[in-house]
Image (tube, rainbow, N blue to C red):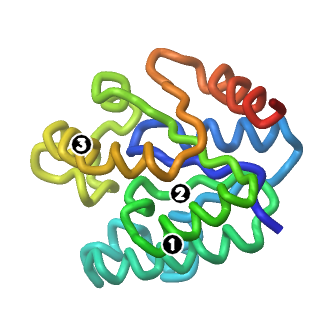
Amino acid sequence: MAPLAVLVGPPGSGKSTVGRLLAERRGVPFRDTDADVEERAGKTVAEIFVDDGEPAFRALEREAVATALGDHPGVLALGGGAVLDEGTQSALAAYAAGGGAVVFLDVSLAHAAPRVGFNRSRPLLLGNPRAQWQALMEARRPVYERVSTTRVVTDGRDPADVAATIEKELSA
């Protein structure tokens, strides 16, 4: 069983909020691969980064995405960096080739900043968080665009409106 939709995008794009609303609208479960990783590891993403390092986190994340793509029937939100893994890119390509919807939630720094809050729970945004976010987005944007089947800009939009837009795309 494959997901109804997979949401990708940078921190602050609204993947979790919009994903929950979309799942509710469609009467399906919501799942976030970061939560799957935390449950499996028994600690937060930030703790995994500090205790075990980014490679260990990415390995757990790759496994969580592959599992969810194979058995989750609802809306799936991926961690912002999950798309950087080549195995995940291949899995998303196969999912999309089979008719799956990969939705890139695109957001500008100005709109992501208040949502993210640039706090310590986001280990890749430590130091100068705005500059870090901008650098992450510049590196990731081409990948988000390549793996997605649909792009929805979330700047200045209510999450319910974004979910409704995605729902219309799924019904088209």
Q: Which image quadrant for residue 135?
A: top left
Residue extending furthest toward the front: 97
Q: Residues within 10 Å of mark 3 (few under 14, many from 20)?
A: few
Rendered-image quadrant of the N terminus: bottom right
Q: Earlier in the sequence, mark 1 or mark 2?
A: 1
Q: Residue at x 85, y 40 (%)?
A: 26
In this view of the protein, which residue sits in the foreground, 54 or 117?
A: 54
Q: Residue at x 57, y 61 (%)?
A: 93
Mark drawn on residue 167: none
In three-dimensional space, the C-alpha distance between marks 1 and 3, rounded to whole angstroms, equals 27 Å
Q: Which image quadrant for residue 158?
A: top right
Residue that label 1 marks: 38
Q: In the image, is 124 to the left or to the right of 143?
A: left
Q: Are marks 1 and 2 in contact (CB under 8 Å)?
A: no
Q: In the image, is 157 to the left or to the right of 82?
A: right
Q: Residue at x 25, y 75 (%)?
A: 50
Residue that label 3 marks: 138
Q: Is residue 165 above or below residue 24?
A: above
Q: Amino acid at mark 1?
A: Glu
Q: Residue at x 54, y 17 (%)?
A: 157
Q: Is residue 4 above or below residue 82?
A: above
Q: Amino acid at mark 3?
A: Glu
Q: Amino acid at mark 2?
A: Leu
Q: Are marks 3 and 2 in contact (CB under 8 Å)?
A: no
Residue extending furthest toward the right: 27
Residue that label 2 marks: 78
Q: Nearer the viewer, mark 1 or mark 2?
A: 2
Q: Are marks 1 and 3 in contact (CB under 8 Å)?
A: no
- Residue 78 location (% of width, % of height): 53, 57
In three-dimensional space, the C-alpha distance between marks 3 and 2, rounded to whole angstroms, equals 18 Å
Q: Earlier in the sequence, mark 1 or mark 3?
A: 1
In three-dimensional space, the C-alpha distance between marks 1 and 2, rounded to whole angstroms, equals 13 Å
